[in-house]
Image (cartoon, rainbow, N blue to C red):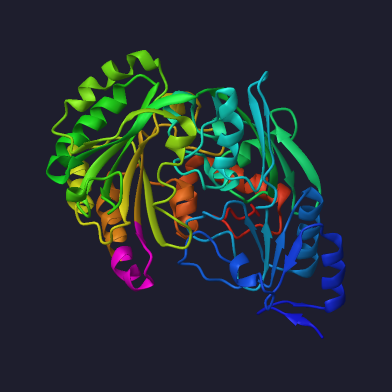
Amino acid sequence: MAAQSSTVVVDEATIASFKAQLRGELIQPGDAAYDEARKVYNGMFDKRPRFIARCVDVADVISCVNFAREGGLLVAVRGGGHSAPGLGTCDGGLVIDLSPMDGVHVDPVEKTVRAEGGCVWGDVDHATHPFGLATPSGFISTTGVGGLTLGGGIGYLARAYGLTVDNLLSVDMVLADGSFVTANAEQHPDLYWAVRGGGGNFGVVTSFQFRCHDVGTVYGGPIFWPLDQAKQVLTFWRDFILGAPRDINGWFGFVAIPPAPPFPEQYHGQTMCVIVWCYTGDMDQAAARFEPIRAVGTPAMDLAGPVPWPALQSLFDALFPPGLQWYWKADFITDLSDQAIDLLVKYGGQLPTPYSTMHLYPVNGAVHDASPDAMAFNYRDANFSEVIVGVDPDPANNERMIEWARNYWLALHPYSAGGGYINMMMGEGSDQVRASYRANYDRLAQIKARYDPHNLFRVNQNIEPAK
């Protein structure tokens, strides 16, 4: 009896042979584990893969790539599963699930860390923190190392130490033809150039090696202000962060205060503005450094202070559990004008659901050290990365929050640099993908043609192979 997907028929003997090659588990429709295994972080995506292979090693990944290529199967690669547009799954194809591959090795002498492709950032932080080390990552510790890195990696440490890709030393990869390569400055330098921001277009990354920095305890956390002070706070933050020393970072956002500790009951459900800080400098100087920040307006809640790096990185994990409905819109901004600030405040005060939010991340400081053509990530002249996110547990609210996010984005887009952060975009289409790489797109398409000429890896923010 043949097994079928919507487009591809795979005979049982071939499936049995594939399954015998795997050390990991092969999950199919009808298996007890199937419904749980097919879930991804963004509950807006409810897809039904024909196969889910939970790989435990590189050999499993090679078998998966060969099986998919030879059988004409659609391939989705899943690391942490946080992809905004649900790119860690597909209908009728093969999901290469790397989540069992979560080993981490720290070299405290060389100050490097190697993380397997299924790791989340919490795994990395857990391993590096006892050595007083960290590598730049994102803002939530359940985010996958693979997805965040391959798209660029904007996070708390970006102003001090650059993007995640600026600290990526080497990758191990399985290519579309099933071969295994290491890409770094000496080996496959074109591939190394491409994976630093070019997404999952070029193969399956099975491990990442990063440079680490001396980061243990930081001075960080959120300071909240009432909504009627948002313009004052946002204007201050814009001017402050553009000229601030690199050892201080803080992202600005609009949020609804959760009805839970540590927030006082009188603020529950209120929309406020917030800056979430991360200072990596001398802790003895921290209080003095924050004096001008605390003098802005009248903060409603001040929760900033000394905190272990992993605690800051995981601060919001519990607020955003897997399975919520997510809709994202993103742009880079070079000059944040007063007119743009007025629009940010207008729409930010109209959050459509308690989970919805808008964040502005600074991407200056060390992010500007690399040239736009140094690697695939291009927007080295931008100062801010904007993300507008409609979020809610209930799909019934999707239409309302999507309309809000789109209107917000349309109002701000004329003030943008023209493209957005690839990790915070939905399936925007080829024009928006091209805009996100600007002058680097054509080179990426040529490298794609060299390493994946038939576009096997296309469940991503896709870069089509050059003809």
Residue at the spot 50% in from the left edge and 28% down from the top edge: 371
- Point out the residue furthest to the bottom here: 1
Q: Is residue 2 above or below residue 351?
A: below
Q: Is residue 333 above or below residue 44?
A: above
- Locate residue 458, reporting x and y percent: 62, 59
Extent of the magenta region: 390-402
Q: Is residue 224 above or below residue 132?
A: below
Can residue 278 be seen here?
no
Q: Is residue 48 above or below residue 328?
A: below
Most prominent secondary structure in the magenta stretch? helix
Q: Nearer the viewer, residue 106 or 331?
A: 106
Which quarter of the picture shows residue 66? bottom right
Q: Quadrant of the C terminus?
A: bottom right
- Locate residue 347, reporting x and y percent: 21, 53
Residue at the spot 54% in from the left edge and 33% down from the top edge: 373
Q: Quadrant of the N terminus?
A: bottom right
Q: Nearer the viewer, residue 447 or 57?
A: 57
- Locate residue 48, reporting x and y percent: 60, 73
Can residue 402 be seen here?
yes
Q: Number of labelled discs?
A: 0
Is residue 149 in the magenta section?
Answer: no
- Locate residue 36, reporting x and y percent: 59, 67
Is residue 395 in the magenta section?
Answer: yes
Which quarter of the picture shows residue 327? bottom left
Position of residue 312 in the picture relative to residue 29 (left or right): left
Position of residue 3 in the picture relative to residue 48 (left or right): right
